[in-house]
Amino acid sequence: NAGVTQTPKFRVLKTGQSMTLLCAQDMNHEYMYWYRQDPGMGLRLIHYSVGEGTTAKGEVPDGYNVSRLKKQNFLLGLESAAPSQTSVYFCASSTDYEQYFGPGTRLTVT
Amino acid sequence: SQQGEEDPQALSIQEGENATMNCSYKTSINNLQWYRQNSGRGLVHLILIRSNEREKHSGRLRVTLDTSKKSSSLLITASRAADTASYFCATGSGGSYIPTFGRGTSLIVHP
């Protein structure tokens, strides 16, 4: 099993550009999550999903949108990137409390 | 807002020594997890302890939970250079599977 994969691994955007980060899991997990990790801030939850077709806001949802059209995929979109969105983004999935994380996407917005 | 706060923020030890890091939290929980993150990688789950448990072991890891003090500790015995990583606690409460992560402890084990 590949576990949780994220695409792309690195990306540089200019302010105002848009992009979509893709997360895929092959463990048939119901729950999926998007986090951002900034130095000294730990992990902060952006959005999450409790099942196919559902999404909900986390701690820091502003400037991001998500979709979960298929159970195995969870997409994170940035409609108009801002320098404050420079971060490392992690996707995770779970069936219960234990979360399985992807390798991360390092995004820089200039 | 962070629920769990790890202490110390950074820890540097020699190989073979024990490493202890602590996590304090503010509100009642029903479980607490510890994760490891190697540099440039995603987090990896280490252990989960429930609120009705006081201690759990997994290999060289020992986790304790004191709900009266709202704190947990992670002990890594006989540390190795490969244990160099950041360690995060994550608290769970209510009926949700969504944990709240702390800011982490950075552990460096010198060979």
Image (cartoon, coloured by chain):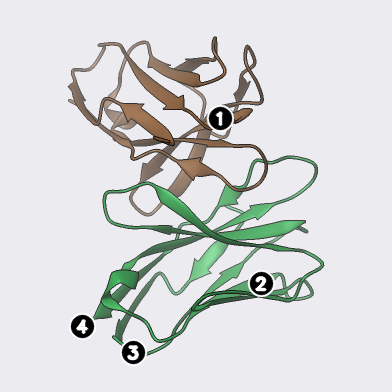
Instruction: Tell me the subunit letter for badge 3.
Output: B
Instruction: Tell me the subunit letter for badge 1.
Output: A
Question: Mark 2: which amino acid?
Answer: Ser
Q: Residue at x 66, y 72 (%)?
A: B71
Residues indicated by labels 4 and 3 sit on the same polypeptide chain: yes
Q: Which mark is residue B71?
A: 2
Kindly report the distance in space between the C-alpha atoms of the residues bearing marks 4 and 3.
9 Å
In the picture as drawn, the residue positioned furthest to the front comes out as A1
Between discs 2 and 3, the one toward the N terminus: 3
Residue count near mark 1 (Cα–Cα under 10 Å), binned few <14, some 14–19, many ≥20: many
Kindly report the distance in space between the C-alpha atoms of the residues bearing marks 4 and 2.
30 Å
Residues indicated by labels 2 and 1 sit on the same polypeptide chain: no
User: Looking at the picture, how far across and down is residue A84, in whole percent?
Assistant: 32, 30
Asked whether the residues under the numbered discs 1 and 3 touch, taking CB atoms below 8 Å apart as contact, a structural biologist would say no
Q: Secondary structure at mark 2?
A: strand
Q: Secondary structure at mark 4?
A: loop
Question: Mark 4: which amino acid?
Answer: Pro
Between discs 4 and 3, the one toward the N terminus: 3
Kindly report the distance in space between the C-alpha atoms of the residues bearing marks 2 and 1.
28 Å
Along the line of sight, the residue nearer the viewer: A53 or A46 = A53
Residues indicated by labels 2 and 3 sit on the same polypeptide chain: yes
Instruction: Tell me the subunit letter for badge 2.
Output: B
Instruction: Tell me the subunit letter for badge 4.
Output: B
Question: Mark 1: which amino acid?
Answer: Met
User: Looking at the picture, how far across and down is residue B19, in whole percent?
Assistant: 43, 82
Q: Nearer the viewer, mark 2 or mark 1?
A: 1
Q: Nearer the viewer, mark 4 or mark 2?
A: 4
Mark 4 sits on what residue?
Answer: B111
Asked whether the residues under the numbered discs 2 and 3 touch, taking CB atoms below 8 Å apart as contact, a structural biologist would say no
Mark 3 sits on what residue?
Answer: B16
